[in-house]
Image (tube, grey):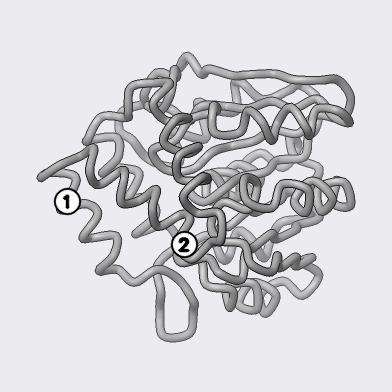
Amino acid sequence: MTQIHKEVYGQGKPIVLIHGWAMHSGIWRKFAQQLAQNYQVICLDLPGHGLSATVEPYTLDNIIKALIEAMPEKPCCLLGWSLGATVALGLASQYPQHVNSLILLAGNPRFVQESDWAGVSPKMLNDFADNLQLNCQLTLIRFLALQVNQLADGKNILKELKQAIQECNPPTEPVLNSALNILKHTDLRAELLRLNCPVSIIQGDNDSLIPVKVSQNMQAIKPEITVNIIEGAGHVPFLSHQSDVLEIIKQSV
């Protein structure tokens, strides 16, 4: 059994939050405390991130197997951000009895761009992988800067992101590379189609990693998906547009 770190706030219906690449549960803290005024909020550190032990090999299936042990006993709302959205979608597909609703926050079942699918260019992810070998810390800072690209309050949000990740040692280079490989190679579009629980999407229209067109791509697969586009938000709307995200969650749970 893999040791998975969790932070729990509040009481009520459970909502599980799964963070993104290179981050940890600390990134949610202010947001989670606001959300916990109405729900029990459970923030999980991905394996190899924050204070959680890692898994070997570092695959999506092994990540899901580790996290399922830390999930609440009764069905919950599962919210994943960025890489966490990929994990959340995979978990909801493999363990539907644990999830009664799914929220994909700046997420994508197929992260990489294809001719008929909006996503990140493969070159961007390959450049991240190459740069990790040259300077891991600088690559993480560049990644954080991408998260707040073009936001009016970008400098302050970037400072908050940096402070949050500095609470813990960063993931090792092998973990970061393996997680990038998950983003490069995972395709969960078929799993999205088969899901029986309600699915909501939250996206920013200025997201430099998840193009806004992704929501249209996902609705083409599953028309009943609820789409929420936050004007002026980038890749971290729970920091830049907290009240908007909180309101959307209230409507989705």
Left or right of residue 243: residue 130 = left
Image point (76%, 37%), residue name: 97
Hey, which residue is sitting farthest bottom in the picture? 115
The image quarter in which residue 19 lies: top right
The answer to whether residue 74 is above or below residue 126 is: above
- Tag 2: amino acid: Asp
Mark 2 crowdedness (10 Å alpha carbons): few <14, some 14-19, many ≥20? some
Reading the image, the residue beneath label 1 is 131
Reading the image, the residue beneath label 2 is 187
Mark 1 crowdedness (10 Å alpha carbons): few <14, some 14-19, many ≥20? some
Disc count in the image? 2
Picture quarter with the C terminus: top right
The answer to whether residue 215 is above or below residue 76 is: below
From the viewer's perspective, is the residue at label 1 or at label 2 nearer? 1
Image point (75%, 58%), residue name: 200
Q: Give the secondary structure at mark 2.
A: loop
Using the image as rendered, state which of residue 168 and residue 115 is in the foreground. 168
Image point (22%, 35%), residue name: 173
Q: Give the secondary structure at mark 1.
A: helix
- Tag 1: amino acid: Asn
User: Whole-percent x and y of residue 252?
Assistant: 85, 51
The image quarter in which residue 190 lies: bottom right
